[in-house]
Image (tube, helix red, strand yellow):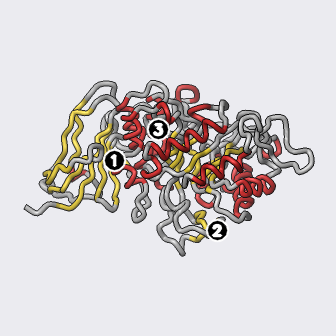
Amino acid sequence: MYFSISLAALVTIPAVNALVYVDSTVQGKLPALGWNSWNAYYCDIDEGKILAAANSIVDLGLKDAGYEYVNIDDCWAVKDGRDNVTNQIIPDPLKFPTGIKGIADEIHALGLKVGIYGSAGTLTCGGYPAQLGNEALDAATFAGWGIDYLKYDNCYIPANWTDTYDACVPDAWQIYGPYDNGTCAASPRDAPPGYDWSTSNNAKRYRIMRDALLAQNRTILYSICNWGHAEVQEWGNSTGSSWRITGDITPDWARIAEILNENSFLLNYVDFWGHNDADMLHIGNGNLTLQESRSHFAFWAVTKSPLIIGTALDKLAAEKVEILKNKALLAFHQDDIYGGPAEPYKWGINPDWTFNATNPAEYWSGPSKAGTLVLALNTLSTPVWKEIIFSEVPQLSKEKSASYHVTDAWSGKDLGCVKGRIRRWVDSHDTIAFTLGKKCDW
């Protein structure tokens, strides 16, 4: 269940209102950790694959690392309609012979939680029955099945629910760009200055399901998947626990860099109880190198996006499992004292505040219980030297000769007291990361 809490009552929340769970002091406060079926199997899902993923989460140590949600994405329902008596949505009996309730019970018995997929339209993106007009019924059905998480998509919107205006989402630049430093070309569908996007039909559709979930007797984490439309970052914090900021991710470095670039300009919306969703992890998919996989995970973690694994876990290489279990980055992601993300402090090869889909900001930092996390990304296609200068990091002393106790975030190696800077040879598309603890006294 949810309630809205005012900024005056909880000053750490950056938005005017934030969605907070009444019956939990934990769920929704921190970004979600879990697994989703879509990037692994698309519509080719069944009970066996979902249960295998759940067991792998346990067996690979991912549960112990904090991953808890097992999310069933699109194509789980009977495609040709609802129950002709109750109007309830029907799980496909061939794919899920024990029903969603049956598989939820098995996943809960493993100490994990279960997610389901829906859409704020007449059909899901795969063409299956969706929730628009049936929100209260379906929310009650989901609760009855024991669902803990709802990913809510944005497909098949009828004409009476479309919006008069379109907000700028500077995404997919190869098709729709170029974007002049993050701006879209003028359009007759641009909103007038000062338009309140929380009054849009898009926002209203998502609030209807929020209220339906609020009426249930169990906590169902609400993940908004409207692809960044209708300036969702302006109203998502009072509507859901996370909100997608772009279109879909693909398993290639160019798309990962593009999403990171877009997210780097929206991080002021991230704090406890509300998180930009950079989309699911593609580690283990496509042709991502090990270095690109490290950077993908690192920046999804430090920007405090939900970390939702999207690959076949039974085929995932051990070295990539270890990326997903990285202790330092997960500790930053799940920090219960510092809710904000790491942010860029220097763009590197571009002037600061440059919107560049191929070469996003390269130098980042953020505070945590363990100290200051600093990262340097190589956005180039060749190895380069990267230098983290301590006096440039906003959280650290401006004293150029200052020394700090340093730990390598990837290896966990204690580097002892390091003076002034860290310099490393960094492979193409790789990221170095260090935790800087207490200042050293010489």
Q: Which secondary structure, mark 3?
A: loop
**Please, what is the three-letter code of the amino acid marked with disc 1?**
Trp
Compared with 97, 287 (above or below) is above
In this rendering, does residue 104 appear at all? yes
Q: Disc 1 and disc 2: Cα gap in Å? A: 34 Å
First-in-chain label (1 vs 3) = 3
The quadrant in which the N terminus is found is bottom right
User: Can you identify the residue that label 3 sits on?
Assistant: 181
Residue in the picture at 65% in, 40% down = 73
Q: Disc 3 and disc 2: Cα gap in Å? A: 37 Å
Residue in the picture at 61% in, 56% down = 221
Mark 3 or mark 2: which is in front?
Answer: 2
Within 10 Å of the Cα at label 1, are there few (<14), some (14-19), or many (20+) other Cα atoms?
many
In this rendering, does residue 168 appear at all? no
User: Can you identify the residue that label 2 sits on?
Assistant: 3
Compared with 169, 303 (above or below) is below
Depth order, front residue of 296/142: 142
Mark 1 or mark 2: which is in front?
Answer: 2
Residue in the picture at 51% in, 65% down = 13
First-in-chain label (1 vs 2) = 2
User: Can you identify the residue that label 1 sits on?
Assistant: 364
